[in-house]
């Protein structure tokens, strides 16, 4: 039996399990197969880096449970990575190109680059079928001449995040995104206001993971708790934030998220661990809870026996 004799729906289900090279090769055999191939690419993890080593490290840092079948790691040619600005510009232009070519059926997209810019954001905002979006901008193990380690400490604020705010057009049609169920941001320069607009446009979110988003303050918790998202939200991870305003005040807003099944505040050192434990035992009853840190100070040095040799 040939694939051409099968109904398109069955062929598409088979192609979903092919790795990217095989899937793209199948699409080159005919126009009809190319159309089916594009509809079969529903999941994509895309990383673009200046070296193979940086690409491998990024892949290992990605969520372990994610499928690697549709994972693409692109290495920039030397001519396109001559300096930091050149790298970031070409990362975003290539992300935009890939998304525009293959993104119309994407439901799950994860991208990894150094900085999120307008070309990539404009392309992603057009993915109206997207259900899961992960933007990973934290790669502290990267070694590149001219790139200081402090670059990874905090992302600068940018209006580019406004482009991810889903919404309705005048005729009621969706303008951008709007159907997200999962949002994951790492080292994103998003502000409280921009975060609120993204929530406003994606009321069906069930999972929000924010890691090292230092532009967000305690106000972000208030915005989330008072939004329509809080009624359906099951997973909320807000981690690696040492912002002073992320303190015990946010616990009041967490308590208003009644449907939470998983909560992580790991690395938010201004929140009292004992208070979190107490509130969960008495009020929240969240099954999967990760405390802000160990009860000892996170900055405490390691004690070494001076006589050990």
Image (tube, grey):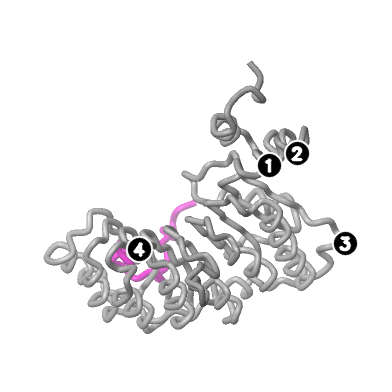
Pointer 4: residues within 10 angstroms few (<14), some, or many (20+)? many
Pointer 1: residues within 10 angstroms few (<14), some, or many (20+)? few
Label 2 element class: helix
Q: Residue furthest top?
A: 1
In the picture, residue 70 is in which quadrant? top right
Residue 293 on the magenta segment = yes
Label 1 element class: helix
Judging by the rendered image, the residue that carries numbered circle 1 is 35
Q: Is residue 251 left or right of residue 34?
A: left
For the residues labelled 1 and 3, say whether their Cβ atoms are less than 8 Å apart: no
- The residues tagged by marks 1 and 2 sit, at their Cα atoms, a distance apart of 6 Å
Using the image, tell me which numbered label, if any, was put on residue 236: 4
Please tell me which residue is depicted at 63% across the width and 15% down the height of the picture. 1
- The residues tagged by marks 2 and 4 sit, at their Cα atoms, a distance apart of 43 Å
- The residues tagged by marks 3 and 4 sit, at their Cα atoms, a distance apart of 41 Å
Mark with earlier residue (1, 3) = 1
Mark with earlier residue (2, 3) = 2
Residue 81 on the magenta segment = no
Name above or below for residue 165 compared with residue 184.
below
Q: Nearer the viewer, residue 171 or 160?
A: 171
For the magenta stretch, what is the residue range?
290-309
Q: Position of residue 15 (x, y in %)?
A: 60, 33
Label 4 element class: strand
Mark with earlier residue (2, 4) = 2
Judging by the rendered image, the residue that carries numbered circle 2 is 31
Please name which of the two marks, 1 or 3, marks the residue nearer to the observer: 1
In the picture, residue 30 is in which quadrant? top right
Judging by the rendered image, the residue that carries numbered circle 3 is 79
């Amino acid at each position: 039996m040939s694939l051409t004799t099968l109904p398109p729906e069955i062929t598409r289900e088979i192609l979903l399990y092919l790795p990217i090279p095989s899937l793209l090769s199948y699409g080159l055999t005919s126009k009809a197969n190319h159309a089916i191939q594009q509809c079969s690419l529903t999941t994509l993890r895309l990383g673009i880096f200046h070296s193979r080593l940086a690409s491998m490290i990024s892949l290992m840092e990605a969520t372990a449970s994610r499928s690697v079948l549709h994972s693409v790691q692109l290495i920039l040619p030397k001519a396109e990575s001559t300096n930091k600005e050149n790298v970031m510009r070409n990362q975003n232009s290539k992300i935009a190109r890939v998304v525009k070519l293959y993104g119309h059926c994407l439901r799950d997209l994860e991208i990894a680059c150094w900085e999120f810019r307008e070309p990539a954001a404009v392309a992603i905002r057009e993915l109206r079928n997207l259900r899961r979006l992960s933007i990973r901008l934290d790669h502290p193990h990267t070694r590149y001449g001219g790139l200081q380690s402090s670059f990874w400490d905090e992302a600068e604020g940018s209006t580019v995040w406004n482009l991810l705010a889903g919404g309705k057009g005048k005729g009621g049609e969706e303008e951008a995104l709007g159907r997200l169920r999962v949002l994951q941001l790492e080292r994103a320069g998003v502000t409280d206001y921009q975060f609120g607009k993204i929530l406003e446009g994606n009321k069906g979110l069930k999972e929000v993971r924010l890691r090292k988003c230092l532009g967000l303050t305690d106000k972000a918790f208030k915005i989330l708790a008072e939004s329509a998202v809080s009624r359906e939200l099951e997973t909320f991870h807000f981690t690696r934030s040492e912002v002073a305003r992320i303190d015990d005040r946010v616990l009041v807003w967490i308590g208003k998220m009644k449907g939470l099944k998983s909560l992580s505040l790991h690395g938010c050192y201004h929140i009292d661990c004992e208070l979190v434990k107490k509130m969960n035992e008495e009020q929240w009853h969240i099954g999967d809870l990760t405390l802000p840190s160990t009860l000892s100070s996170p900055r405490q040095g390691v004690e070494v026996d001076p006589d050990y040799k």
